[in-house]
Amino acid sequence: MPEDIDRAKYIAFVSKRRDGTSISTPVWVVPFDDGYAFTTDTNAWKVKRIAHDPSVTIQACGMRGKPNPGAPVHRGRAVVLGETDIARVQDAVRAKYPVMYKLLIERSDRKAAREGGSRTVGTAAIKVVLDDRIEAGST
């Protein structure tokens, strides 16, 4: 497992639209089984994109998605995880990002409950298993 991703607070998760256009999204990341995982919304576009093409790249980045200087790009395959694994990823994310999790995820959950809605944030999880490493700074 690459040390740069193990240490990263955020990664740029890059998936492709049907027309081949690459879309980069900064996400929190946690080591998970034989890869890395993050939570997302069930209806997020990244979930739909990897259903069509599971080939992705990841790269350590800042909060706004700008790659860290010299950070290598890693190629892999993404998969949407099932219910049991979603809970495990949520727990790992909560443990790694306790303050931000309370501020963003739990606050959103409480607001949805007050308004009579259901949870929408972090209701799905994506795992990336890495294939190999690409040169630093390339996509």
Image (tube, rainbow, N blue to C red):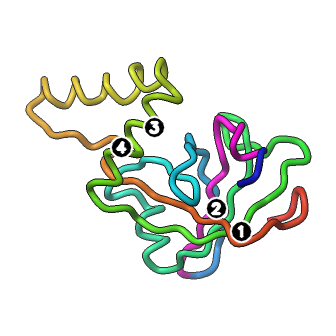
Residue 3 pos. (x, y %): 77, 45
Range covered by the magenta-colored residues? 4-18
Q: Earlier in the sequence, mark 3 or mark 1?
A: 1
Q: Residue furthest front?
A: 33
Amino acid type assigned to the residue bearing label 2 in the image: Val
Q: Residue type at mark 1: give it.
A: Arg
Magenta span contains residue 17: yes
For the residues labelled 4 and 1, the Cα–Cα distance comes to 24 Å
**What residue is disc 4 on?**
122
Up-down relation of residue 2 to residue 29 (above or below): below
Q: Give the camera-side residue of 39 and 91.
A: 91
- Horizontal and vertical percent for residue 84? 28, 54
Which of the two labelled residues, at mark 4 and mark 3, occupies the earlier sequence position? 3
Q: Which residue is mark 2?
A: 14
Q: Is residue 27 left or right of residue 130?
A: left
Q: Tag 1 or tag 2, which sits nearer the N-term?
A: 2
Mark 2–mark 1 distance (CA, rounded to whole Å) = 9 Å
Side of 108 where 113 appears, left or right: left
Q: Disc 2 and disc 3: Cα gap in Å?
A: 22 Å
User: Mark 2 or mark 1: which is in front?
Assistant: 1
Callout 3 amino acid = Ala
SS for callout 1: strand
User: Residue sitting at 53 percent across and 68 percent down?
Assistant: 78
Q: Position of residue 90 (x, y in %)?
A: 38, 40
Q: What residue does disc 3 label? A: 92
Report the disc number at residue 75.
Answer: 1
